[in-house]
Structure formats: structure tokens, C-alpha cells
Image (cartoon, grey):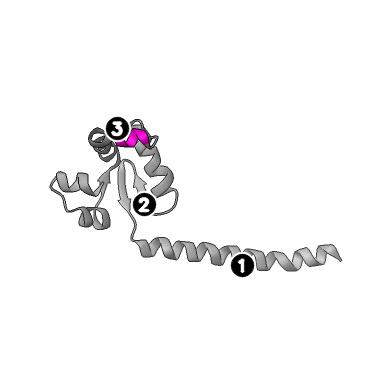
Amino acid sequence: MAEQLADDGKDPYATIVKGTLDLGQTAAGLYEKNADLLAEGGLDSAEAIEKCFLNNFVGLGFATVNGDVLRFRPPVNRFLDVCLELGTARSGEESESPAEVSDGN
């Protein structure tokens, strides 16, 4: 992706960290320039690349999609989300423990 952005005359760092990308256009460009390599990895179409973005970057919380606009989130946001998820899970476990103990008596 960084190579494609540079080839398109864009600053890869600024675009990925601070900008937005058209999801469909980015996937199509990546596939057009790297079809053979991507096919070896199981991505045999631009649609497969879009699905990969959605499942991986978005699914894991590293990016958001609004319509067809892909925006990468700052890494610290993802780190904080993981911490909050772990904290919520831990709080849920702690609140369930007394109920589980009392049910067994």
C-alpha cells in the first residue's frame, strides 16, 4: 500500500496516519499493480482485498470505514481499546465470581 501511495505521488506516512483512502479505489489499485503476488496469498480480486481490509484492519480495530472511506486509527487508540476491553472483561469476571460461589452453596 505504501508503495502504491508513493507511486501515486502521495506521502505514504501522511496518508496512512492522517488521511483517508477510498476503500474500493485502493483495493483496485493494489490488485491491478500486484495481482500475481496477491493471488499467491489468496487474494484473487479487488473485492477480496476489500474484504481483507474489513476483516483485518477494521475487524481488529486498526481502521474504520465510513461508506467507502477507509481511515486508519492512531495506534494508541487501538491500544487503549484493548486495555478497556480487558478491563471490562476483568470487571465482568469479578462481578460474576460472587454469584457463582453463592450458587454453589
Q: Earlier along the polypeptide chain: callout 2 or callout 1?
A: 2
Task: Determine which of the numbered discs, if any, sits on residue 57 in the image.
Answer: none
Q: Earlier along the polypeptide chain: callout 3 or callout 1?
A: 3
- Residue drawn where x is 39% and y is 63% of the image: 77
From the image, give the main secondary structure of the stretch colored magenta.
Answer: helix
Q: Left or right: where does residue 77 sit relative to residue 23?
A: right
Q: Left or right: where does residue 1 sit relative to residue 73?
A: left
**Kind of residue sitting beneath label 1:** Ser
Disc 3 secondary structure class? helix
Residue 88 position (above or below residue 9): below
Foreground tag (3 vs 1): 3
Mark-to-mark CA distance, 3 and 2: 26 Å
Residue 73: give x, y in percent of width and height. 34, 57
**Kind of residue sitting beneath label 3:** Asp
Q: Which residues are magenta?
A: 36-40
Q: Left or right: where does residue 4 sit relative to residue 88?
A: left
**Kind of residue sitting beneath label 2:** Ala
Task: Determine which of the numbered discs, if any, sits on residue 63 in the image.
Answer: 2
- Residue drawn where x is 59% and y is 62% of the image: 89
Furthest residue to the right? 105
Mark-to-mark CA distance, 3 and 1: 48 Å
Q: Which residue is mark 1?
A: 91
Q: Characterize the local packing of mark 1: few (<14), some (14-19) or many (20 or more) Cα atoms within 10 angstroms.
A: few
For the image, the number of numbered tags is: 3
Residue 94 position (above or below residue 13): below
Q: Which residue is mark 3?
A: 36
Residue 38: give x, y in percent of width and height. 33, 36
